[in-house]
Amino acid sequence: MTILHLSEEEIQDYTDGLSTAGQQAHVAACASCKLRISNYQSLFSELQTLDRPAFDFDLATLVLAQLPTAKAQYPWLPALAAVLSVIFCAVIALCYGSLIGQFIKGMSQIWLLILLCPGAILLSLQALHLYQDYQSKLTEIKLQDLAT
Amino acid sequence: MNNRYAYTLNDQQVVAQILSGDINAYAQLVKRTEGLVTQMIFKMINNPSDRKDLAQDIYIKVYKNLGDFKFQARLSTWIGQITYNTCLHYLSKKRPVLLNAYLDADADEQRSLERLQQKTQDIHSNETESIIFGKQASSILHSEIGRLPPMQKLIITLFHAEELSYQEISEITGLPDGTIKSHLFRARKTLKTNILTNYTREDL
């Protein structure tokens, strides 16, 4: 029998059922290693029977009440509407471009501002939303990298 | 609610039922997997009211992304991944210090490991006491697990209480097997050493 006791890592592996024939022979004759294995066995078995934490509310009921409504039956519909809108605007611009130009030129500055300002605000909000979305995705990617 | 889902349908069938609009199937999926999700949330998040919000957020995310799940892992493992990432994201927003405890705890761990090694050397030379757990075992173990570094706390729970394999824990956390084994080794060693040094047989 070798007098070299099993290392702490080997003792843990042994308790997990991973051991070599040499280690088994040593443990069979070594009271100290047997005791160390027995202590881990007690610990592991107690860890398996620990009470599991539980919420004091019905999670399934809470979640069901918040589920988003069913997905659109035709998810391609918004894209089709956008394409048709662009085509419609292009046709109008081609057919009545000169008339629209004259109309805009004839408008007072106040009316121009009334038309342009909401458009600019809407565009800015869209850009801000896109930026926030981008930042949030970037953060998730960074977290993944950090975790690995 | 129909309990047949819980026992007769496998993961693929439950997902198919949910995607076809069966809301009761989703309730059963929550019931099947909430044990793991609750364990993870309790180990990663200390604030009780935040735990409740997070648990709901996680299952809303699962529902929204279920159509993209391609069974590349077990359904519970995939939900575990979402839980882990959602908790990390929460920590990064609300508790940057706690996030560092998860992701950058090497320095602290190194110091505690050195202290532990000193303690264990004393014990190795004279480990004569047997650990025999009694009535107080549960509260003592809960308290000692609570004192472990965050990642060790999570990994020892996933391995021993949830009985997940190294590979499953690796898929959930994105950590390599070796890192998980190292966290698990340290956690078990710390628990054993602390129990042997801090408690007598009568305490346990």
Image (spheres, grey):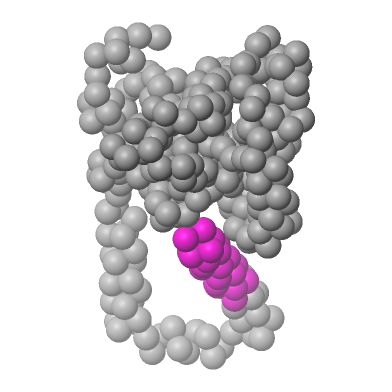
Near-viewer residue (A79 or A20): A20
In this rendering, the answer to whether A60 lies above or below B12 is: above
Examine the image and state in which quarter residue B136 appears: top right
Q: Quadrant of the N terminus of chain A?
A: top left
The secondary structure that most of the magenta stretch takes on is: helix
Near-viewer residue (A99 or A79): A79
* Image location of residue A45, percent across then percent down: 50, 21
Examine the image and state in which quarter residue B198 appears: top right
Q: Residue at x 66, y 17 (%)?
A: B137
* Residue B188 can be seen, yes or no: yes
* Image location of residue B160, percent across then percent down: 48, 30
Examine the image and state in which quarter residue B2 appears: top left
In this rendering, the answer to whether B38 lies above or below B181 is: above
Near-viewer residue (B111 or B149): B111
* Image location of residue A121, percent across then percent down: 62, 71
Span shown in magenta:
A120-148
